[in-house]
Amino acid sequence: MPSVFSDDREQEGDLSLVTRMTGHSVPGIALAGPPGASPHSAKPPAEGHSQLLQATCIPCLRASLLHPPSQQLWDGRRSCPCSHWVKEAETTDMTESSMKKLASTLLDAITDKDPLVQEQVCSALCSLGEARPVETLRACEEYLRQHDKLAHPYRAAVLRAMERVLSSRASELDKDTASTIILLASSEMTKTKDLVWDWQQAASGVLVAVGRQFISKVMEELLRRLHPGTLPHCAVLHTLASLSVANAFGVVPFLPSVLSSLLPVLGVAKQDTVRVAFCSALQRFSEGALEYLANLDRAPDPTVRKDAFATDIFSAYDVLFHQWLQSREAKLRLAVVEALGPMSHLLPSERLEEQLPKLLPGILALYKKHAETFYLSKSLGQILEAAVSVGSRTLETQLDALLAALHSQICVPVESSSPLVMSNQKEVLRCFTVLACSSPDRLLAFLLPRLDTSNERTRVGTLQVVRHVINSAAAQMEDKKPFILSSMRLPLLDTNSKVKRAVVQVISAMAHHGYLEQPGGEAMIEYIVQQCALPPEQEPEKPGPGSKDPKADSVRAISVRTLYLVSTTVDRMSHVLWPYLLQFLTPVRFTGALTPLCRSLVHLAQKRQEAGADAFLIQYDAHASLPSPYAVTGRLLVVSSSPYLGDGRGAAALRLLSVLHPNIHPLLGQHWETTVPLLLGYLDEHTEETLPQEEWEEKLLMFLRDTLAIISDNAWICQLSLELCRQLPCYDEAPQEKNFLYKCIGTTLGAASSKEVVRKHLQELLETARYQEEAEREGLACCFGICAISHLEDTLAQLEDFVRSEVFRKSIGILNIFKDRSENEVEKVKSALILCYGHVAARAPRELVLAKVESDILRNICQHFSTKVLGIKVETKDPALKLCLVQSVCMVSRAICSSTQAGSFHFTRKAELVAQMMEFIRAEPPDSLRTPIRKKAMLTCTYLVSVEPALDEQARADVIHGCLHSIMALLPEPKEEDGGCQKSLYLETLHALEDLLTSLLQRNMTPQGLQIMIEHLSPWIKSPRGHERARALGLSALLLRYFLEHLRVSALVPFHNLGLLIGLFSPRCADLWPATRQEAVDCVYSLLYLQLGYEGFSRDYRDDVAERLLSLKDGLVHPDPAILFHTCHSVGQIIAKRLPPDQLISLLLTMFEALGDPEKNCSRAATVMINCLLQERGGVLQEKVPEIVSVLRSKLQEAQGEHVLPAAQHSVYLLATQHCAAVVSSLLGSPLPLDSHTCMLWRALAVEPRLAAQVLGLLLEKMSRDVPFKESRAFLLGRTPDRVATLLPLSATCALFEVMSTPAAGPAVLELYPQLFVVLLLRVSCTVGVQLPRNLQAQERRGASPALATRNLEPCSSAVDTLRSMLLRSGSEDVVQRMDLEGGWELLRTSAGHEEGATRLARAMAEHAGPRLPLVLKTLACTHSSAYENQRVTTTAFLAELLNSNVANDLMLLDSLLESLAARQKDTCASVRRLVLRGLANLASGCPDKEKMEFRTASIRLFGHLNKVCHGDCEDVFLDQVVGGLAPLLLHLQDPQATVASACRFALRMCGPNLACEELSAAFQKHLQEGRALHFGEFLNTTCKHLMHHFPDLLGRLLTTCLFYFKSSWENVRAAAPLFTGKHHPLPHPHAARQPRLMPPLHRVPGAALGAQAAAAGGPGPAHCGAPDPAEGPGPRGADEGC
């Protein structure tokens, strides 16, 4: 919701609000603050109080509409939020007109339709009235007078505001103002005869408020409204009644006049509403008169007497009682009854006595007619008081009826939801008080017999009345105490909770009034104590009347409060309760009352101490029923062991024990005064949930031990022990306290010096113990153990005596197994005895117990555990017996370990006991934890491990394996709601396992010892079940922390298994269980610090890098996988920074193992960390690359997760970026055929162009380095051919295929296009007919497995596929498609069709990949001397076919092609020579014409125009083109197309100057002019002469070009070619003198020198790259390039 006045629109809204409230606009209104400011933060203007209105209330009204009413509504106690401005108006010199305007605006707003706004306006008026009451009231009066037509709800609102102002400011009015207001209010009140209660009540309120100060004027006006013989207005009656109560001293003097005017018209009143008004007025008149008469000392006229009103009141009474009370209208009857109560006090005495026989029955009869009886009871009480005050005798005759009626009323159940019922009960009890004071005997005779009834309501009601009259009529009940006490006999036996509460309340009243001092009072005290002892579960659930807490009104709670209040506040009860309450301490049935008893006794004892020592000391002889000091001591000490039960009875018992010390033993005072407060302080520091029970019990036992040492009286101690033994049966239902009592007995016997007494009590304990109870067996054993501290020999002797005794033999005799005693009972006795021996060993002095461990203690323990029947050992099935054995052996082992002589003690039965413990552990169910046997057995093993002799390695391994299997396989730990005990047992068992493992580790604190422990945990760390992993990681973290904390490095040694351990734990940082992730980080953290410790760093050293792990733990809590794996990457970075280089490979290999983890998250984390390590530290792994790649490949075959392969690809990529050659070599070692995973690894090397190019280069090198095949002996001898492919080139070929099958390899393939094409073409040629090795042939026949690639492994097919893949990846899809259509690939694979396949490949390349050919031919140039015939055949076929395409001319390849073919003319292979000839034939045949005349014409003309722009650096280039195109241009002067021939003329004329031969250029200009007839023979003869003379070195090139045109499709051109050739007949070698002139132009022709050399050698010159197709005409390439 927006704030008030948040912008200009808000201001406008508030202005409209003013307009709406006032009904007209307010000119000049100005807000007190800027837009957006709080309306209460602005100050009022210094002048112009007319603006104060707008700054004061309108913002407040606006804020009140925008904020909750609870924050903005104001009542009479709170002023308007703007009241500080109104208060300022009080101190400001505000003019009357400004004040009037302010009030007027507010009054105008009173008519707002919103009730909230109306209320705020009224509050503002009240605040204004507080500051300026007179002006405000005048403004209101004037407003109502001027707005005569204003609706009554708004008039009422203004009147209520006036009343609130007058209620506090009426004294400031002057008489004129008061008169004006009185007249206004009177007029408003009586303006309409109809009853408009809201309006008329508001006007009446104004008159009443003014009447408090101006009573005469108000009464004068009201009397003026009373007309004789006419019924007054109801509002007038109401006003008179209200004034009588508000100002009794002012109204009562006018009462005679008022009554004289009203009484005559009572009979005229027929309407019930008028009659009710009259009744209310008479009631108030009577109450005012009674107040006046009761305070005559302050009255203005002290001479006024009751008689002044008696006659008039009786007249009114007569009408009300005899006429109006008979009405059928219930409301009227109640109004009459309510008026009769106070009126009865004003009736004349004789009249009252006369009317009582009719009045009382009339009132009582109404009880049956009205459900709400409060007004009846209230009036009846007033009438009874009036009757008693006049000494009425008639009342006696009505007493029975009154008691019966009142009793029925008090027995009505009280409902908290009906306050009138509660009030009615109070009034009824008031009536009983009146009757008890006047007729106590009659009252008790009526009440006491009703206590014997069994009806709950009757008994409870009666007890309430009894309690009330005991308190309110104490004097009258003084001599009735014995009767009342005796009548409580049956109520004391009632078990109803409500009756019990009522009885306790009666006893409380009795205690205050001396009843409990009477005979029979002790029964009442005992009853209170009994109720204090009620258990909580028996308390009622329903709350009592008016109670918010049901427990607060329970019987026990009320009884506890009553007992304490009686003990502390009623002085006369002190001698009654002391020392009587002591006898309730020891009986079991009062256990629940111990806390309140102790508190009361403490208070009573302290009061007695203050009175003197004689009063405090208890005379036990005079009080035979009191418990002895020994009983009190034992009882209070034992109940203190459970200090928080029973509302904290432990603290209460200790306080009482401390106070009672003089009555227990005189020597205890100083010691107890010091120690008891310490015990109490310890309890204050804890709660029931946090108190360590064993520690608390030990403090109490120490308190008892010190107490006995101080007393040091054997007789006293023996008596105490006897009393403690007697109390044992009292605690059968409280096992914990009985257990502690046994400990107290053991402590007491330990302090006794009499051996006979000690052995006697021990024997009795053994004979009387309840062995079926586990707590009792434990307690008995504790007793023997504590006693053995001082009496070891006697304790052991007594145990053996008991075994030999008749009692024990009857228990375990063989016949009894089948008779009376069950086997289970016998096992329980044995369990107790075994436990006793264990506690004796645990508590006896260490220097004495070692000598008896094996000879006495263990011998007897084993004897009792192993039962023999007829000489055969019987295995026990009782888990309790097993548990006792385990517990006892544990205590024996602990005793040995804690002895100072443990190092020299040789425990011969150690191995036997360990084996027995492990047998118990293995016998437990592996999936559930039901008993603590596992925990106790592992704890026993923990102590046994530390004892000599040491366990052998196998035994240690068995212990670790057995214990881990017993705990790890348990179901997930129980939650709190499943049972706190079960969870506690689980945690304790886990702690026992932790202690055992750390104990075993401590025996071998070396890296090897740590490794052994972790190896045992490793299967659980990798478990598919989350809770098992969590436990294993928790144990691992614990062991590592322990190892780190106890690390002692004497010399710098390597932590050789660091990598293995980190590799095991680090992937768990992404486990599905958050707890496991946290523990994994802790493990890595500890391992890094262990490494630092082995490097020589101190234990307190903190490494910044390692410490970052702790900050990363928060990221592992987040379930978002992105955050999780980012955190894992950070963990990997930290590991990479701190891991020694020699541990890196072991870490990686361990993490590779984690790739197959069944927990996918951990597998993913392993991949993240592996790649992080490779990225950070991969540079040092060059020698390990083969091993890494090999392991990675094997793990890929095992791993199932889809995430593993991409991660492995990235790993190989990271390795390759650092060790490319090693990775390539390692992958090439993969077996063939390549499996799918290896293929994916090869593809991973192509994801980055630079790396892909490097990999491709290495593979090409590998492919070229080795021979492509090996020839078998059979082949060498000329038998059947048998060539077998070598593996390295074959693997490289397959690898190339995989690398180039990746789209990302495209740029690298383009970069190495010529090398790849040539090498793969050669590979295809040399593998034709080559076979696979025999092992690979067998695999091919068996068929590839699903994990292997499905590609053909046959050497030639593999090479063809790779070549095809290379062309596809390089963008030569058209070549591949052409080959597919023509079947070229299949031809390449076969010996018969291979040559044709190469030819088709060349044709497809020439057609669709021409721009690639120059570099390809350059790479192929070096292959003519290949040692492999197949390669020479293939390349020659490829080159020969290129000569059949015009691409040779287009790309200027003719020279290089001819040179390559020329080099192969003398090859030893006939196929090669044949293919050379085919190439020359292809050269001669040329290509068919595909161009149109227009295109040729345009191309030739363009060639001529290029002369204009080819200058400078490009001039030599253009010259080469001119020389190359000279022959075609000359021949095509004979072209059948005239336009082409004309274009040739133009081109020759334009290019002539470029030849730097003036004669030749002049000949071109002379013979080739447009429009001139050309004599071709003459022109050709002239031209050839100049060429032969000036350019002899070009003749071979020109002649070679002419050869193309011998088969031209145009006859004239075909005829011109031999003519041109014939004109170039041989010339003598040019003279030396002319050589310099010819050299410059030859130097400018790039192919001139080469042509000259070729001509000199007698062979053809190199074909010029620009040589045209004879059918196309000269220079199309030149034209194209020009374009």
Image: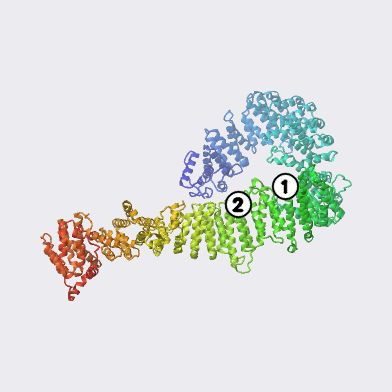
| Amino acid at pointer 1 | Lys
Q: Is residue 615 left or right of residue 561?
A: right
Tell me where residue 556 appears, x and y as whole percent. 75, 41
Foreground tag (1 vs 2): 1
Which of the colour schemes (rainbow, by chain, secondary structure, one colour) is used?
A: rainbow
Asked which quadrant contains residue 1472, the reply is bottom left
Asked which quadrant contains residue 67, the reply is top right
Task: Relative to 242, say whether 66 is above or below.
Answer: below
Task: Relative to 147, say whether 825 is above or below.
Answer: below
Q: Secondary structure at mark 1?
A: loop
Q: Of label 1 and label 2, which has the lower sequence position?
A: 1
User: Which residue corresponds to mark 1?
Assistant: 877
Q: Residue at x 80, y 34 (%)?
A: 490
> Which residue occupies the foreground of this view, 1526 or 1385?
1385
User: Which residue corresponds to mark 2?
Assistant: 1028
| Amino acid at pointer 2 | Glu
Q: Is residue 542 left or right of residue 582?
A: left
Tell me where residue 598 appears, x and y as whole percent. 78, 47
> Which residue occupies the foreground of this view, 1372 or 870?
870
Asked which quadrant contains residue 1661, the reply is bottom left
